[in-house]
């Protein structure tokens, strides 16, 4: 993923900042006891005004950490005019907000 401009890169309290400082995505322990990482997903849609949508995917790791056993995802979080705007918006999410989104995804999963 291209590094977004204007992300608070000196702080690891946002998704973009954390990735910049630590050179890896943040990891979380979910309320289900499983470890997760997070990645930004951006897709194009047929909306002429906002053709880029962004959401988060949470790869679910085996408790041993040796492989991905599933994933959860958020609904669409942002609709933007450019890919860069979608990356910037998602990268600016605070880690505490991402943890809350993970918990929402866990609670709504079957």
Image (cartoon, rainbow, N blue to C red):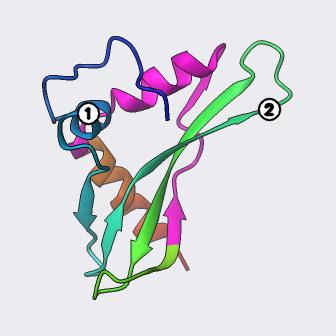
Residue at 52% across, 77% down? 70
The label on residue 54 is none
Write the residue at 54% across / 24% down.
86
Count the labels in the image: 2
Question: Where is residue 43 drawn, in percent x and y?
Answer: 69, 37
Q: 69 or 48: which is nearer to us? A: 69
Q: Residue at x 68, y 26 (%)?
A: 52
Q: In the displayed structure, would residue 63 be above or below residue 99?
A: below
Residue 20 disc label: 1
Callout 1: few (<14), some (14-19), or many (20+) C-alpha neighbours within 10 Å? Answer: some
Q: Front-most of 39 and 101?
A: 39
Q: Residue furthest bottom?
A: 64
Q: In the image, residue 75 lies at what x, y percent?
A: 58, 48
Where is residue 74? Give x, y as percent: 52, 52
Task: Check disc 2: other Cα within 10 Å, few if <14, some if 14-19, many if 20+.
Answer: few
Where is residue 12 drawn, in percent x and y?
15, 35
Label 2: element kind: loop
- 46 and 24: which one is in front? 24
Looking at the image, is 46 positioned above or below residue 50? Answer: below
Which quadrant, please, contains the C terminus? Answer: bottom right
Q: Earlier in the sequence, mark 1 or mark 2?
A: 1
Pointer 1 with pointer 2, Cβ within 8 A: no
Give the left or right position of residue 103, taking residue 90 as reference.
left
Q: CA distance from mark 1 to mark 2?
A: 28 Å
Q: Nearer the viewer, residue 22 or 14?
A: 22
Quadrant of the rendered structure where residue 81 is?
top right
Q: Please report the bounds of the magenta region as a residue range.
A: 71-96
Local SS, label 1: helix
Residue 9 relative to residue 101: left or right = left
- Identify the residue shown where x is 26% and y is 43%: 23
Q: Is residue 46 magenta?
A: no
* Location of mark 2 (residue): 45
């Amino acid at each position: 993923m291209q590094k977004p401009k204007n992300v608070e890169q000196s702080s690891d309290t946002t998704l973009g900042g954390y990735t910049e400082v630590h050179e890896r995505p943040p990891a979380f322990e979910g309320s289900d006891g499983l470890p997760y990482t997070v990645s930004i997903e951006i897709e194009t849609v047929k909306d002429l005004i906002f053709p880029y949508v962004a959401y988060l995917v949470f790869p679910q790791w085996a408790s041993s950490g040796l492989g991905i056993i599933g994933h959860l995802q958020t609904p669409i979080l942002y609709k933007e005019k450019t890919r860069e705007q979608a990356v910037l918006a998602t990268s600016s999410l605070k880690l505490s907000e991402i943890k809350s989104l993970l918990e929402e995804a866990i609670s709504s999963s079957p």
